[in-house]
Amino acid sequence: MIKKEHILDSARKVLSEQGISKLSLRKIAAETGCAAPSIYYYFRNKQEIVASLWEDIADGLLTQLKQRDDKEAAYREFWLSRPDDFKLFITQPDYYPYVVDSDAYHSVETMMGERLPGMNGQLMDKIFRGTLH
């Protein structure tokens, strides 16, 4: 039987190799080695898959923020070390609503406060311009 973790690993691989525009349940199923309908046992659609991937990333982000006094530096360093994840979770209009509605994002907002939108804008500029340092 196919496992949820295998589906998520396959989705991450498809995303990293082909990008968000090429992500489909059919491609995830092919990478996982199962029929596309098997994925529906765990996920209703690709948005739910991306939301699950976000939860995994968010756990790491929250851990880093909790461990550091300088929350801005921790947030910036986390995302600059994962520019593809930032592009997927923070800048994709198809997935951003799933991210901002999550408990994890609400926790990030609580920790970062009013600085968060500005920091996201600065990070977006750095990441899309390719100036990661």
Image (cartoon, grey):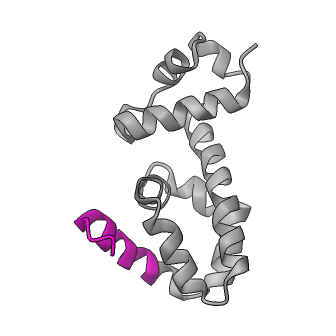
- Place of residue 63 in the rendered image (x, y in percent of width and height, measured from the top left): 71, 69
**Residue 127 or 114: which is nearer the viewer?**
127
Residue farthest toward the right in the current orientation of the protein:
1
Q: Is residue 129 magenta?
A: yes
Q: Residue at x 58, y 19 (%)?
A: 32
Q: How many marks?
A: 0
**Residue 62 or 100: which is nearer the viewer?**
62
Q: Residue at x 25, y 65 (%)?
A: 130
Q: Residue at x 63, y 66 (%)?
A: 61
Q: Is residue 132 magenta?
A: yes
Residue farthest toward the top in the current orientation of the protein:
35
Residue 10: quadrant of the picture? top right
Majority secondary structure of the magenta segment?
A: helix
Residue 1: quadrant of the picture? top right
Asked whether residue 96 is in view, the answer is yes
- Place of residue 20 in the rendered image (x, y in percent of width and height, measured from the top left): 40, 41
**Residue 129 or 88: which is nearer the viewer?**
129
Asked whether residue 43 is in view, the answer is no
Residue 83 in the image: above or below residue 122:
above
Left or right of 52 on screen, residue 90? left
Left or right of 107 on screen, residue 31? left
- Place of residue 117 in the rendered image (x, y in percent of width and height, measured from the top left): 47, 79
- Place of residue 105 in the rendered image (x, y in percent of width and height, measured from the top left): 65, 66
| Range of residues picked out in magenta | 118-133
Q: Residue at x 49, y 74 (%)?
A: 77
Which quarter of the image is occupied by the C terminus? bottom left
Left or right of 119 on screen, residue 46? right
Residue 84 in the image: above or below residue 31:
below
